[in-house]
Image (cartoon, grey):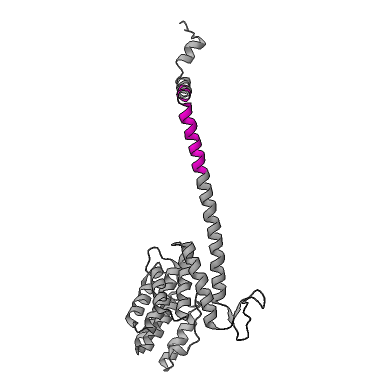
Amino acid sequence: MGTTKLTRKEILSDDPVRENILRLIGLFQANRTKIGVAAIAVIVIALGFWAWSHYLDNRAEAAGTILGRGMEFFSASVSPDAEDDTYAEGGTPVFKSEEDKYQAAEKEFSAAAVSFGAGESGKTARYYLGLAQIKLGKKDEAKKNLESIAFSSGSRTVGFLAKKALADFYADSGNVKGAEDLLRGMIKDAKCDLPKEDIGMQLAGILVADGRKDEAIRVLREASEASPVFGFFNQQLQTEIEKLQKGVPVEDAPPEEIQP
């Protein structure tokens, strides 16, 4: 049986890869000006994205510095003998009065909230802004800022912290039902990542202040039953239950620190 031999020219003429390459070369030659402009446009767009990303990184870093300074002011010490320069005594700020330090913190948190926008860092800034405004007696502003975080979609830890702060705010303002609904909702919410025992003790304190001691004891017992036997809060829960049963108000327990 004979074998038909193809010439190199014949082989290349049937090569689909070669045909595609030749077609692309022809396309480039016919449209080299348009392709050059498109390539330049791609480069400009890429540089634009890089510059914008670099700008956002620098902005976030600056806003982070403002937020950190605000948190430092919020927890700063107070001394009547403090200098006008809050850092006169070293790296730790000291203010002459509580009002001075919360005013300074409010200014920083407000700036950070604007810089960070709707992100998690922005929510953190707005949360602390609300706390500072509560300390300054700016109730309407504080309520607005805390509610904007507590009831926004996608709330995480800072959102639940805002709800805890709002619960106390509502209770102090006479809206006991609003406070109770917030805390009970958090206890039932599987997505809530704050200690349910802590929330239960806060709710119990509000119920006792409202004259509902038996209900407060029930809340504490439920929290204790759901808490690990050797958990951090279990012994404190038992202590609170015993105090209520003996007639000692929950408010007499050591005050809780505000969680960051």
Give the residues drawn in magenta, as a range. 26-46
248 on left or right of 70:
left
- The quadrant holding residue 61 is bottom right
Q: Out of 72 and 48, give the one closest to the viewer.
A: 48
Q: Residue furthest bottom?
A: 247
The secondary structure that most of the magenta stretch takes on is helix
Number of marks in the rendered image: 0
Looking at the rendered image, the quarter that the N terminus falls into is: top left
Give the percent coordinates (x, y) of residue 47.
Answer: 53, 44
In the displayed structure, would residue 198 be above or below residue 154?
below
Q: Is residue 204 magenta?
A: no
Q: Residue 96 or 27: which is nearer the viewer? A: 96
Instruction: Give x and y (percent) for residue 2.
Output: 47, 5
Percent x, y of residue 43:
52, 39
Location of residue 31 in the rendering, given as x and y in whole percent from the top left corner:
45, 26
Identify the residue at image location x=50%, y=66%.
112
Q: Residue at 45% x, 83% y: name it.
A: 237
Residue 18 visible to the viewer: yes
**In this view, 18 is above or below 58:** above
Q: Residue at x 35, y 73 (%)?
A: 185
Q: Residue furthest top?
A: 2
Question: Going by the picture, which residue comes out furthest to the left?
Answer: 177
136 to the left or right of 90: left
Residue 226 in sight here = no
